Amino acid sequence: MFVVLLGVSGCGSSDSDGGSAAVDTSDQSMTVDPAFVDRAEAVCTSYADYNAEHLLRLPGFSRFAPDPDQLPKVAAFLDRNPAYHTLVSKLEGLGDPSTGGTAWTTAVADLGDGQRLVQEEVRQARARDADAFAAAEQDRADSNAALHADLIAAGLSPNSPCLAAQVDPLQTTTAMH
């Protein structure tokens, strides 16, 4: 993202009339306006609550070396999580924020990526393909790290329910490390 911003900045400075490049009013601020954040967090709250109450209870399960016989149970567990079916569409239904539009679009795209990757995990788990499941889990974990960074960059608090709405779906305990 930094490289892209430098490229845009460089293009604006070469403007022949000496003026600055036009800026979309929704992006004058890099962060999403507080009223929109409140609306988004209201949407995210039920998903965050679901995640807090539904932990994977599968003794001996290892996400990176899964037992193929456990994978169908993992698939069913993941597929029940509503965050990976409806969260993105509900957030898109909010429309665009008055500020921080680009940051918000990036965060929602990250959520969509997470949703797609969890569905890939479900497919691989149903197929009992332990190696493909572990690879999909690593991709999902990497995507989730980017999502959290992008939500915070958009101006959401580290305690935002939108971050908790798409946490580690294979979490087995509420204890913090």
Image (cartoon, rainbow, N blue to C red):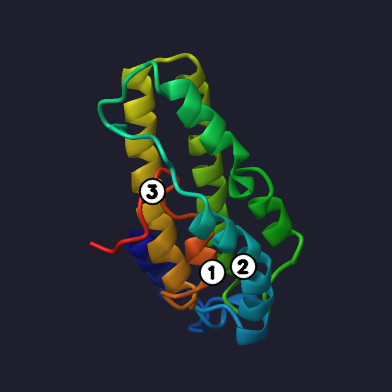
Residue 31 image offset from top left, x and y in percent: 51, 79
The residue indicated by pointer 3 is: 171
For the residues marked 1 and 3, what is the alpha-carbon distance in whole angstroms?
Answer: 16 Å
For the residues marked 3 and 2, what is the alpha-carbon distance in whole angstroms?
Answer: 18 Å
- Residue drawn at (38%, 48%) of the image: 171
Between disc 3 and disc 2, the foreground one is: 3
Amino acid type for the residue under numbered disc 2: Thr
Give the number of the disc on residue 44. none
**N-terminal label among 1 and 2:** 2
C-beta proximity under 8 Å, tags 1 and 3: no
Q: Is residue 92 left or right of residue 64?
A: right
C-beta proximity under 8 Å, tags 1 and 2: yes
Looking at the rendered image, the quarter that the C terminus falls into is: bottom left
Mark 2 lies on a secondary structure that is: helix
- Residue drawn at (45%, 48%) of the image: 55
The residue indicated by pointer 2 is: 45
Badge 2: few (under 14), some or many (20 or more) residues near its Cα, within 10 Å? some
Which of the 4 image quarters holds residue 14? bottom left
